[in-house]
Amino acid sequence: MRLIKGCFIFIGVITVLLFLLAGFGYCLLSLSPPLRAQMIPVALTPAAVQSLDHKLEVFTTEIKKAVAAGLEREISLVITEEEANSKLVLAIGEGKLPLREVLVNFRKDVFLAYGALKTPGLSVKVGIKAYLELTGGKPKFIIEELQCGRLPLPKEIRKNVGDLLVVLFKVPMANLSGIFGELPWQATGIYLTDGQMIIKGVTKKGW
């Protein structure tokens, strides 16, 4: 009887500890990640959305004109923080992103992102610090830091987050993602400066 009673007590203690750990993890996930404090708020305007759409339209037209004329021409596209954030927030409002809020900052050579995931009964807040590079003529995020609230995460989780970011941005940036691989041009560089993302490339001849 003492053995059985001891087993029940042991199981009870383990159960209580598991509930405490679950509650502790919940609290850590719902806290803002440390990276959020390093980020700067960005103004959101309908004009910024229209500006980005117009830039993408002009960029596409320039490529097609150069190809039609048989010219190899250098081209570039500059996207501001205001344009990127306004477009992302619009996508949230339209239900195209599983987020409650989002913020991206462009720093010199560094991409910072914060988002609160739209999950039932749980507010998971994520912070990401990454670098951008071109791989096979397409943008790729190299994750340096990944923070889910204040919960420690193993480094292995970072491996697929960069690909997830690209997929995530393809939703609101459908026009932007379409220019990679679908138009007759070759991207030669993608750069981040304070407040801007710069994409450079060259049109293809004989397309």
Image (cartoon, rainbow, N blue to C red):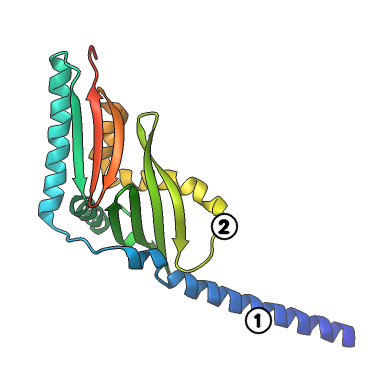
Residue 193 percent coordinates (x, y): 26, 47
Q: Amino acid at mark 1?
A: Val
Q: Badge 1 is on which residue?
A: 16
Residue 90 falls in which quadrant of the image?
bottom left
9 displayed left or right of 193: right
Percent x, y for residue 12? 72, 82
Picture quadrant of residue 30: bottom left
Disc nearer the start of the sequence (1/2):
1
Question: Quick check: 135 left or right of 13?
Answer: left
Q: Residue at x 15, y 42 (%)?
A: 53
Q: Is residue 121 visible?
A: no
Q: Which residue is mark 2?
A: 154
- Position of 75 relative to 28 (above/below): above
Residue visible at 26% across and 63% down in the picture:
40
Secondary structure beneath label 1: helix
Q: Is residue 42 above or below residue 25?
A: above
Does residue 178 appear anywhere in the picture? Answer: yes
- Residue 8's place in the image compared with 180, above or below, is below
Q: Which mark is residue 170?
A: none
Q: Residue at x 30, y 33 (%)?
A: 189
The kind of residue tagged 2 is Pro
- Estimate the x, y position of residue 72 in percent, counting from the top left: 20, 18
